[in-house]
Amino acid sequence: MAYYSPFIEDDGNLLLPNEVTYTHLLQLAEIEEGYKIEYKSLWNNDVKKKHLAKTISSFANTEGGWIFIGVNDDGSIAPICRERTDFGQQISGIVKANISPPPAFETKFIKCPDDDTRGILAIYVREGSEPPYICRGTVYIRVGSSKFPVVSSHRSEIDNLINKRNGYKTQFEKFCVDDILNEDNFPYCIVYLYNKHPSGILNIGDRSKRGEIQNIADKHRFKSWMPSASSILFFNSEDVSSSSRTLIFELFYNFSMKLHIPLTPLPNALSRSVAEDINQRNAKIDVSNFKAIDGFLSYNSIKSLYEAAFSILIEKEVSFENYILKSELKNVYNSYLFFATRNDEWCEFVCKKGFRYSTKDSISPIIFSSENLCEDELETRSGVYAFNSLAFPFGYFIDEFFEFLELNRKHANTFFPDHSYTNRDYYGRLFGTEF
């Protein structure tokens, strides 16, 4: 799925949709309508109801392409009026109502320099990873500069689209391999964020980009980082040995990501104490042979890496809708989540409503669908994704989990009002046990 753009900078780089300006549109005068370019001079009901959905689905089924509304057939500019309703919302409604599954696209209204009310609507449709895209019961593909329906006698075209979809699925499965932590005994979480439609490359060969990488490390409090053949590894500790069990944020040059998060086990003495306390409250529950994972500390670790990932996508204007997100818990057989609450609310819950634990060593129950992000909802969305990655596999409902999380947070804040502590400090102050 090579990215295509008709707009080229002086240095030869292809421009992304969000980078295109009115001046760049002048390059269209040299480009004819074709396999990846379609011009429409008007934004009217004929375009909206008859042509747009067919054109978008044909690009998604083939190799992607651009639609320019407000441009004549010869590439000359004929600005359209800006409407009160956002163009992106209008097109999204048309796509969802007419195409199944809805393909990924981006829109930008490029204003005239001397008139904010007029401009050109640019729509970039990505080559789809789930073809065939069916528009009102028909599959369209690009042939030359036109869109053509695939008729039943051309079954091979449908087979080609299905094979293409299976190829993307294979690429995703190959990406979802943990080749860094891969611990045999230590419980951990790994999150895969796979960019189906990469259109930008993080080039650290450019010296100026290294400062950009350092800024990412500083912003998200990573202690160290190093490049690899295809990615940059950010570490939450200066000790990056295999025994350090540090958080590792892996950012690939095409903006795919892997989040490697060791979960926090309870110290042995505390784990035994918790097991005894539960058994005294309810003699039918014996958890002495189970492994306790600190739900509060583990959740915050997972949430912090989700926030880092989502923040980078927002900052770099990379659409989250392009991603497939998969989460896994590993080495969690006979493990349970523990919460340190002031009045033992968690222990009471376990004794009355049942003990919840993992019956499998590896849990991969969820592949998330992704919707786009904004800065205002960054913390909330990160929290929900962290819940789905950690608590949902252990059988918690979201209201139960966040109730215990909040009680644990308040308990910790009584000892650490500045929210700053190491795990050793945390257990030492809350339980009188070193970690």
Image: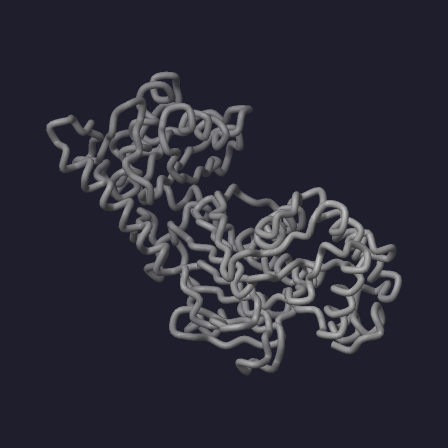
How far from the left and from the top, in percent, is residue 409? 79, 57
Pick out the residue farthest to the front. 283
Q: Is residue 130 left or right of residue 268?
A: left
Q: Relative to the observer, which residue lies in front, 74 or 329?
A: 329
Q: Is residue 46 left or right of residue 330?
A: left
Identified at 35% across, 54% down, the residue is 14
| Residue 211 visible, this angle | no
How far from the left and from the top, in percent, is residue 304? 64, 60
Identified at 65% across, 50% down, the residue is 383
- Is residue 44 positioned above or below 225 on the image? above
Identified at 57% across, 81% down, the residue is 243
Q: Relative to the observer, which residue lies in front, 281 or 54?
A: 281
How far from the left and from the top, in percent, is residue 271? 73, 68
Colour scheme in the image? one colour
Identified at 50% across, 72% down, the residue is 233
Q: Relative to the observer, which residue lies in front, 92 or 260?
A: 260
- Is residue 109 positioned above or below 373 on the image? above
- Is residue 134 positioned above or below 341 on the image? above
Q: Is residue 272 left or right of residue 306?
A: right
How far from the left and from the top, in percent, is residue 19? 45, 49
In the picture, residue 176 is in which quadrant?
bottom left
Q: Is residue 97 left or right of residue 414?
A: left
- Is residue 1 positioned above or below 186 on the image? above
| Residue 163 visible, this angle | yes
Q: Relative to the observer, which residue lies in front, 206 or 377?
A: 377
User: Looking at the rendering, in which quadrant would you find the C terminus?
Assistant: bottom right
Pick out the residue farthest to the left. 153
Count numbered badges in the picture.
Answer: 0
